[in-house]
Amino acid sequence: MKNKDKKNIKTSRKIKEIVTDILDIPEELLKNMTKISSISNKKIVVDGFKQIIDFSNNNIALKGKDISVEILGKNLDIAKMQDENICIIGEIEEVIYKK
């Protein structure tokens, strides 16, 4: 990669950081990241998922924008799926993040 290209990438990153700060936009939106939220051990919402890799009562594996996530538990089910968002319910015992 040429020095000019590296410089443009660094400038682009700085601009994204400034825009994020000024407009108070969540970082995961601008940086194309996966966001994972949990409510107790009963519900997980993944924003930015791309694909269901594996699905069973005890295991749900997802490919996100920047990571893969494996959710282990009992009676797992997909409560809602829309665009790039998925809501998983059940008795969640473990969440494994893989780069």
Image (cartoon, helix red, strand yellow):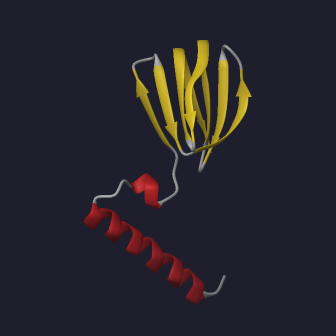
69 versus 2 height, above or below: above
Nearer to the camera, 12 or 25: 25
- The percent position of residue 41, horizontal first and vertical second, equals 45, 17
| Towards the viewer: 95 or 29 | 29
Compare residues 57 and 72 and report the one nearer the observer.
57
Residue 2 relative to residue 79: left or right: right
Q: At 40% across and 56% down in the image, what residue appears? A: 27
Q: Residue at x 48, y 59 (%)?
A: 31
Q: Is residue 86 above or below residue 50?
A: above
Against 36, residue 24 (above or below) is: below
Whole-percent x, y for residue 50 in the image:
64, 45
Classify residue 51 by image quadrant: top right
For the N terminus, the quadrant is: bottom right
Q: Is residue 26 left or right of residue 80?
A: left
Residue found at the very far bottom of the displayed protein = 4
> The C terminus appears in which quarter of the rendering?
top right
Viewer-nearest residue: 7 or 30: 30
> For the point 45% across and 55% down, which residue is it?
29
Q: So how many labels did they put on this image? A: 0
Vertical placement of residue 72 versus 70, above or below: above
Q: Quadrant of residue 69?
A: top right
Q: In the image, what residue occupies the spot 52% across and 83% down?
A: 8
Residue 79 at what x, y percent from top left? Answer: 55, 23
Locate residue 55, reporting x and y percent. Answer: 71, 24
